[in-house]
Image: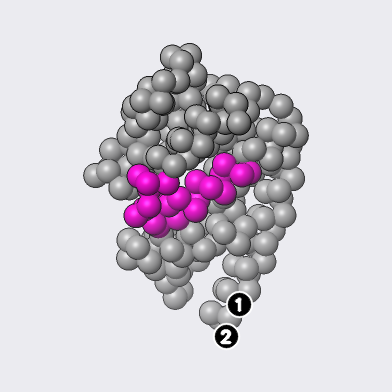
Amino acid sequence: MNHSETIIRRVADIVNQRMADQQAGHGIDHVRRVHRTACDIQQQIGGDRTIVELAALLHDVGDAKFHDGKERSAEFSREILAGEGVDQPTIDHVAHIVDNLSFRKHETAEELSAEGKIVQDADRLDALGAIGIVRTIEYGATVGQPFHIAGNDPSNLNGPKTGAGHFYQKLFRLREMLHTEPARQIAADREQFMKTFLDQFMSEMAD
């Protein structure tokens, strides 16, 4: 095992410990899926593997949902990487990715590096498909948000906040925001699955 692999393994262990109690679709299972997908994309299109792996592992380590509404992932990333003796350019690169990754900042975020775009695509892919449906329902249950309100059209962007409405407000917008071709190909299938699910759901609700 080389030095980079050792650092990645230690960072993965730290993230696993810190995020063990996080749920609502942003727990350690989400991080593992993003890490795996990011590695798959990097293998196809290139980029610095170490940067991709570290950013994927750390991207939600200080998620605002679990830190009183304050996003601290970039801060915690710097702290963890410095504690592991990682060089400053790598720390800065990873922290920049983590700080500019989220959908919430898509209008104000700084330009991501090639590695950052890979991790962002992997993160957004995890909001799509069967996993995306489950995460939406899980988050709604956590915060007391209904998946659907009878009589409400979920495609009405000005309607009440619901899980079904979230599909139109955010999730169905993600594919056109992806950077890499491998991610776009995956997203097309996952988005279609979600549309089929939602059509079936609304049909059954109307019965």
Question: How far apart are labels 2 and 1 at the CA level?
Answer: 7 Å
Residue in the picture at 37% in, 34% down: 73
Q: Is residue 30 shown in magenta?
A: yes
- Residue 120 located left or right of residue 60: right
Rendering coords of residue 206 (x, y %): 55, 81
- Is any part of residue 96 visible from this angle? no
**In the image, what residue occupies the spot 64% across and 38% down?**
39
Which of 180/48 is in front? 48
Q: Tell me, what colour scheme is on the image?
A: one colour
Residue that numbered label 1 is attached to: 203
Q: Quadrant of the C terminus?
A: bottom right
Amino acid at circle 1:
Ser
Is the C-beta separation of discs 2 and 1 under 8 Å? yes
Q: Label 2, on which residue?
A: 207
Q: Residue pushed farthest left?
A: 68
For the point 34% across and 55% down, the residue is 21
* Helix, strand or loop for disc 1: helix
Please state the extent of the stretch shown in magenta in the rendering: 16-37
> Would you say 154 lies left or right of 200 here?
left
- SS category of the residue bearing label 2: loop
Q: Residue 39: say if magenta.
A: no
111 over 189 or under it: above or below: above
Q: Position of residue 179 (x, y in %)?
A: 65, 33
Q: What's the mark number on residue 50?
A: none
